[in-house]
Image (cartoon, rainbow, N blue to C red):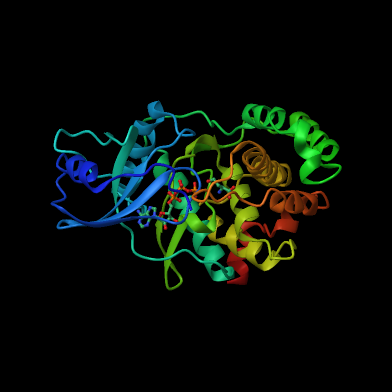
Amino acid sequence: MAVYTDVNEEELSSFLTSYPVGDLLSYKGIAEGTENSNYLLHTTGGSFILTLYEKRVNADDLPFFLGLMQHLAQSGVECPLPVARQDGALVGQLAGRHAALITFLEGMWLRKPAAVHCRAVGAALANLHIAGSSFPMARTNSMGVPEWHRLWEGSREEADTVEPGLREELDREMSIIDTQWPGDLPSGIVHADLFPDNVFFLGDQVSGLIDFYFACNDAFAYDIAICLNAWCFEKDFSFNLTKGVALLAGYQSVRPLEEIEVEALPVLVRGAALRFQLSRLYDWLNIPDGPLVKKRDPLEYMRKLRAHRHIRSAKEYGWTPVASIAAAS
Ligand SMILES: Nc1ncnc2c1ncn2[C@@H]1O[C@H](COP(=O)(O)OP(=O)(O)OP(=O)(O)O)[C@@H](O)[C@H]1O
Ligand SMILES: N[C@@H](CCO)C(=O)O
C-alpha cells in the first residue's frame, strides 16, 4: 500500500476550502501505487483523487504533469482532469507535501488483460502520442539511460544478494544498451509507465489512462516497448505473440510505425525491461520496508529481459506492416 503521508480530517477539510468541490464527506487511503500517497475523497461536489507527491516527484515538474493531463483531457484522451483551486493554481500544499486534486475516473484495471485489451491499449497509446504533439511544454526523461546508470551504481554492490550472478549479468546488459541504444527516433510526449494498473477499462473499452508522473519527451517506440513488456507476458514469463500482434496492430491503426522504429524495436524492448528491472532492484535494496509500502518483485523484469535476448526482429514481437494488417481484416 502506498500511503507514505498521513492526512488528518481537519487539515484535509481546511485544504479543500481552496477548491470548488464542496465539503468533505469521507476519505480513505488507496492501497495501490508505489510512488505517491493517494486518497479517494467523496465531497458534496463529487468524487476525487487526492495525490500527495512524494520524494521521486520533482515539484518543478508538477506544472508539466498536471498541464499535460489537462491538455490531453481537453484533446479527447480519456484521463483525469486536475481540479483548479479558486485562485487558479493546480498545486496546493498539504501535510508538508505538494498536493493536487484530480477527477475520479470510472472503470477498473485488468489483472489479466486479453488480446482485445492489448489492442485497445495500443490504440489509446497512439492517440496519446498524437494528442501530445500540440502540448507546448517539454520534459526530459528523468528515467532515461543516464538514470539507469545511477540506479545501477546504487544497486550493483548488493545485486548478488538478490540472485547470485545478477551483478555480472546486469553489467553486460548495461554495456549492450550503452552501445546499441538508438537516437533520432520519432519522438514527442510519451506516458513512459503505461502498465495495466494505469489503464482503466469499462468492459473491453479503455475508460481512462492515469498516472502521468513519468510522462516526458522521448521516442514513441520506447513507449510501445514499455507496453509490450507490461502487457504481453504470461505468468511463466513467455511472450504472448497474440497479445503483441494485437497491441501493435491497435497502435498502428492510429499511427503506423516508421521503418526506423520497427528496426529499433528489439533493443527498445530490451532497454525498457532493463529500466524497470533497475528501478525495482534499486527500490528493493534501498527503500526501507514498512507496513504501508509495497515493493515490487525485483526479478520479474530480469526474467523478461532474459526472454528478450532471443529476439532479433520486431516481427517476433508481433509487428506486421500496416498493408498486411489491412489485407487480413
Ligand atoms: N483519476 C483516478 N480515478 C480513479 N482512481 C484513481 C485515479 N487516479 C488514481 N486512482 C487510483 O489510485 C491508485 C494509485 O494511483 P497511481 O497509479 O497514480 O499511483 P502511484 O503511486 O503514482 O503509482 P504507480 O506505482 O503506478 O506509479 C490507482 O491504482 C487507482 O486505483
Ligand atoms: N510501473 C512501475 C512502477 C512505477 O510506476 C513498475 O511496475 O515497476
Number of on-image labels: 0
The answer to whether residue 87 is above or below residue 281 is above
Question: Which residue does the image show at 60% across and 59% down from the upper left?
Answer: 231
In the image, residue 292 lies at what x, y percent? 49, 50
**Placement of 62 over or under 132, stated as above or below:** above
- Displayed quadrant of residue 144: top right
Residue 313's spot in the image, x, y percent? 77, 51
* Residue 113 sits in quarter: bottom right
Which residue does the image show at 61% across and 35% down from the upper left?
A: 185
Q: Is residue 253 visible?
A: no
Q: Position of residue 162 (x, y in %)?
A: 76, 45
Give me the residue at 81% from left, 40% from top: 160
Q: Nearer the viewer, residue 4 or 190?
A: 4
Q: Nearer the viewer, residue 214 or 153?
A: 153
Give the left or right position of residue 11, taking residue 202 as reference. left
Q: Is residue 223 visible?
A: yes
The answer to whether 149 is drawn above or below residue 132 in the figure is: above
Instruction: Classify residue 289 as left or right of residue 265.
Output: left
Q: Residue at x 31, y 36 (%)?
A: 95
Horizontally, residue 156 falls left or right of residue 92, namely right
Q: Quadrant of the C terminus?
A: bottom right
